[in-house]
Image: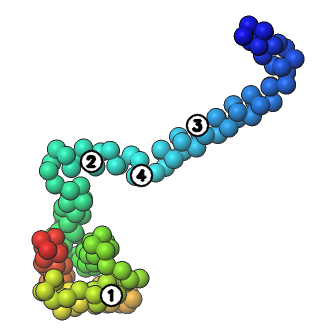
Amino acid sequence: MADFLEQLTSSRVQNLLFPFKLLFALFSLAGAVFLIFVHHNTRWLRARPLRDLFEFYSLKPYEEKEFEQNWKKIKKRLERKWESESKLAIIEADRILDNLLKQMGYRGETLGERLKQLKPDLLPNIEEVWVAHKIRNDIIHDPNYRLSHQEAERAVEIYEKAFDYLRNA
């Protein structure tokens, strides 16, 4: 055994192993840089442990808190009573509904395709949701679309009712 260790540590063997050592060191360095990059640039790695902790202590899903924060922003937009803010409130409410339906497993390229899959027993105000979604489409596709504050409030109420139905389903 001593002979083997003596041969392994000899300068001739060490000179032969040097390129492999260097290559291994470079791969290790590249791997460490990659892990640091992924850690700093991937939101999931930062958020996931915090989400689990939040869910454990609050006894409700993290998405619920995120939903509540987004909904408060929408309500604040409506409080300003500016047409541009009201339009953004409707667009954001529509986006939240789209994300909720995606999370529930509804397939499709657009919210419209996902809404077609809903039945009135799951979403009793589906017809009203279609009206609110049409308002959103008009906002997006027609830059001259005029939106009254009452119309905006009504559309946001429709989305809010839909969220209540879907979250309690």
| C-alpha distance separating marks 2 and 1 | 32 Å
Mark toward the start of the polypeptide (4 vs 1): 4
Instruction: Judge by depth and name the residue closer to the eye, 38 or 16.
Output: 16
Instruction: Classify residue 42 as left or right of residue 33.
Output: left
Q: Which mark's residue is nearer the viewer, 3 or 1? A: 3
Question: Among all residues in the image, which is located at the extreme right?
Answer: 12
Circle 1 residues within 10 Å: few <14, some 14–19, many ≥20: few
Q: SS for tag 2?
A: helix
Mark toward the start of the polypeptide (2 vs 1): 2
Q: SS for tag 1?
A: helix
Mark toward the start of the polypeptide (3 vs 4): 3
Which numbered marker is on residue 112?
1
Q: Which mark's residue is nearer the viewer, 3 or 4? A: 3
| C-alpha distance separating marks 4 and 1 | 29 Å
Q: Amino acid at mark 2?
A: Asp
Q: Amino acid at mark 3?
A: Ala
- Circle 2 sits on which residue? 52
| Residue 29 image point, x, y percent | 64, 35
